[in-house]
Amino acid sequence: MAGLGDLPGAWRRLIKRSLPATLYGRTFLIIVLPVALMQLAVAWIFFDAHWRTVTMRLSEGLAGDIAWALESYADDPTPAGLARTAGRAERSMSLSIAFQPGRTLPENRRRNALAAVDTSLRQALSARIDAPFWFDTTRYPAYVDIRVQVQGGVLRVLAPRERAVATQGLIFLGWMAAATLILTGVSLIFIRNQVRAIERLAQAAEDFGRGRDAPAFKPHGAREVRQAARAFLAMKARIQRHIEQRTALLASVSHDLRTPLTRLRLELALAEPGASTQAMKQDLSEMEHMIDEYLAFARGEGGEQAVDLDLSVLAREAAEGARRSGARIEVSAPEAAPFHGRRSALKRALANLVGNAAAHGSNIRIEVERGVSGVTVRVDDDGPGIPPHRREEAFRAFNRLDEARNQNAKGVGLGLAIARDAARSHGGEVRLEDSPLGGLRAVLTLPGGG
């Protein structure tokens, strides 16, 4: 049997677009579609093999009774003969017969939605009656109206509907439709329960990725889903343990390195002032800055809990910190830009983006924008910029694009890497673009849910 891969590209894309995108929709389709197809097949087989045959037999019997009534009336077309024939038809065949003198057959007839009913009755009447006739199976819910042109007028016959149509077949179809709806409802309930367990697992993974703990999460659902949930919890515990061990190790290394650095700084403070002493002090400052950046990069999230914060406030704080170094910064931000995230990580990310712009440009502009999908922070500078083909390279840790942007003396190539890591841990992103000021634009986007 050919698969989707054997179909032409256009058909394959059409089928993929037509299929539901969610697991809930696809599972529902897998369960309900075969049941619905089976019900349709059974209904069609019943309709074609049983209902149509029974309806034809009923129509033939009714046509035979009407032919008898016509022959009886033709033998004695007097009012007394008509009354006698009508009485017998009423008692024995449940037919109501009336003569309409001077009438002709109607020209129009309403068609039945079930074409097989009209087809069967027309064939049966044509086979048994030679005179012109007209019938309507839709005007009266419980009767079939049949009229035959006779000499001097029209003979009208009202027959019970069950004399011409197998009404039990429609009841059978109704029960099948009801059964399909009940099965569909039960399937919806069970599928929803299984999908909800997967949604809870996905939400727990999303929360963990954004630094939010989910202590109430427990394995739930089918065995395979519970197994995946237990594997996620074990992985989560290993990652948390690794982060804690790495943070503790780096804190210890930082402390051990700062002790000799402090002694060296003290010795230089007591030494005679001079050019060499000043150079050594600058080297010590650079070493301390490098240690701080290494620790900040390796610590990452560092177990910080997410809180409600204001990105407008963080942007203004980052701008104020850069102004102290002499940069000219313009800030455009709404009164409040609420977000739920890790304050220290986002503050560090904004400070790195603003500091990077201040290190390479003389005019800086920060813009905070709230939108339906989240919050966007743009940092523009008028510096030399970075070529488009090297912008992704700028996010690599410890990478310094000296040819593109003259790095400050203290830079170690971690600012953009730390900013992107913080943004992605919140479900966002950092990208680089051309700035309207002529330099580089750094765009930090964070989702609305935080």
Image: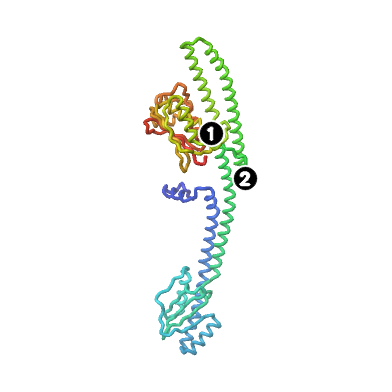
Return the x and y of residue 96 as percentages of the image width and height: 51, 81
Q: Is residue 15 above or below residue 88?
A: above
Q: Nearer the viewer, residue 6 or 256?
A: 256
Is residue 57 something one can see in this rendering? no
Dot 2 crowding, Cα within 10 Å, few <14, some 14–19, many 20+: many
Return the x and y of residue 103 as percentages of the image width and height: 41, 82
Return the x and y of residue 165 as percentages of the image width and height: 51, 72
Q: Nearer the viewer, residue 85 or 435?
A: 435
Return the x and y of residue 425 as percentages of the image width and height: 52, 35
Q: Is residue 215 left or right of residue 438?
A: right
Give the labeled residue for mark 2: 220
User: Which residue type does callout 1 highlight?
Assistant: Arg
Dot 1 crowding, Cα within 10 Å, few <14, some 14–19, many 20+: some
Q: Earlier in the sequence, mark 2 or mark 1?
A: 2
Question: Image quarter for residue 172?
Answer: bottom right
Instruction: Using the numbered discs, state the Cα–Cα distance from disc 2 to disc 1 in whole angstroms.
Output: 32 Å
Residue 243: which numbered mark, if any?
none
Residue 343: which numbered mark, if any?
1
